[in-house]
Image (spheres, grey):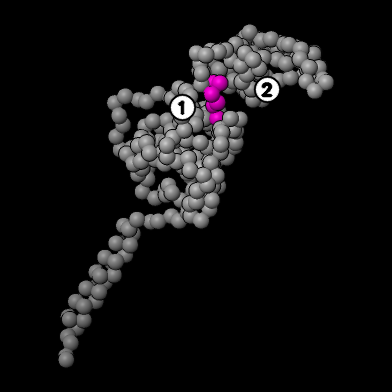
Amino acid sequence: MYVTSRQVQTGMRLGFSLVLMVLLAACAAPQKQSGSRYPEAHDGPPRQRPSTAAKEPVPRPEPLSRYGNHSPYTVNGKTYHVMSSSQGYRERGTASWYGRKFHGHKTSSGEVYDMFQFSAAHRELPLPTYVEVTNLENGRSVVVRVNDRGPFHGSRLLDLSYAAAEKLDMVQAGTAPVEVRAIGVLAAEQTTGKVWLQVGAYSDRRSAERVQRQLQDNRLEPVTVSRVRRAGRVLWRVRVGPFVEEQSIRQADQRIRRLGLGQSVRVGESG
C-alpha cells in the first residue's frame, strides 16, 4: 500500500500523543510506599479548619481499648509486642505526622481519626496512653492521647496528629527529634492526691541545699530538702511541691529542665 508523507506525519503525531497520555497517567497514579501504614504521598495539612480549636487532652484513667491491644501482631513481616503497662516509659526518637488522607477513618483502637485533635500513633504503647511529647529542637511540648498503631516507616518512633505537629512547630519539616514520656495514672488522678516533683537525691547535704537555693531563686517553690536512708546510705532528696493540677506539674517540670537539672520524677504522698 502506498503511504503518503502526510499519512506518515499524522501517524507520528498520533503515536506521540499516545505516549504522552501514558506518561501523564503514570504521573497521576498513586505512588505506593512499601513498609508504611502511613504513606506520605498525597497526605498533607487540612484545606479547611474547624471554627473551634481543640484543646489538649487532660490525662485521666481509662480502660484499655477493646481493639488495637492484641499482642503480638505483625505488620509487613515484622512482629511487635504491646507493652503491658506504659508506667515509666520514656524514649527519644523521630516523630512524623499524618493528616487529611486519614482524617475520618478508623484508627487501630476503633476510634475515628480527627487530625484536629491531639492524638498519636505508637507501635507498642497500650491504647490509650497519654504521653507528653517534647520537640528537642525548640523545646515545645504537647500532651497527646495515643489511640492508634504506627508508624511502620523506618525507625520512626511516633506519628502525631496534624494538631499536635502544629503545636510542636514541625509541620513544615515533616519530622522532628522528640522525647516521649508516658503520663502515668498518678499524674492523671488530679483530684485524688498531691504530687511532688523530685529533682534529685544527693549524698552531700550541701549539694542538695545548693539545688534548693537555685530552685527558690527561680521562683520554684515550695522546695524541701529531706533526709532519707536507702540501701544503707543517707541521701538528701530535693522536692518541689505539692501540686494538684496537671498543668502546674508540667510547667514546673519544664522550668526545672531549663535550669539544667535534668528530668524530675513525680511522686505521691506515700512516695
**Measured Cα–Cα span from mark 1 to mark 2:** 32 Å
Q: Secondary structure at mark 1?
A: loop
Q: Position of residue 202 (x, y in %)?
A: 77, 19
> Which of disc 2 and disc 1 is earlier in sequence?
1
| Region in magenta | 181-187
Disc 1 marks a residue whose amino acid type is Glu
Please give the name of the residue rendered at 29% of the width and 26% of the height, measured from the top-left corner. Answer: 51
Nearer the observer: mark 1 or 2; the answer is 1
Q: Can residue 186 be found in the magenta stretch?
A: yes
- Answer with left or right where residue 71 lies relative to residue 119: right
Frontmost residue, 35 versus 4: 35
Q: Can residue 35 be found in the magenta stretch?
A: no
Please give the name of the residue rendered at 59% of the width and 33% of the height, measured from the top-left corner. Answer: 89
Look at the image and tell me in which quarter the C terminus lies: top right
Give the total of numbered labels. Answer: 2
Residue reaching furthest to the top: 222
Q: Is residue 4 visible?
A: yes
Please give the name of the residue rendered at 25% of the width and 70% of the height, measured from the top-left corner. Answer: 18
Query: Circles 1 and 2: CB distance less than 8 Å?
Result: no
Q: Position of residue 168 (x, y in %)?
A: 48, 31
Residue 16 lies in quadrant: bottom left
Residue that mark 2 sits on: 261
The correct choice, above or below, for 103 with respect to 154 in the image is above
- Answer with left or right where residue 22 lies relative to residue 141: left
Residue reaching furthest to the right: 232
Q: Position of residue 206 (x, y in %)?
A: 80, 13
Residue that mark 1 sits on: 62
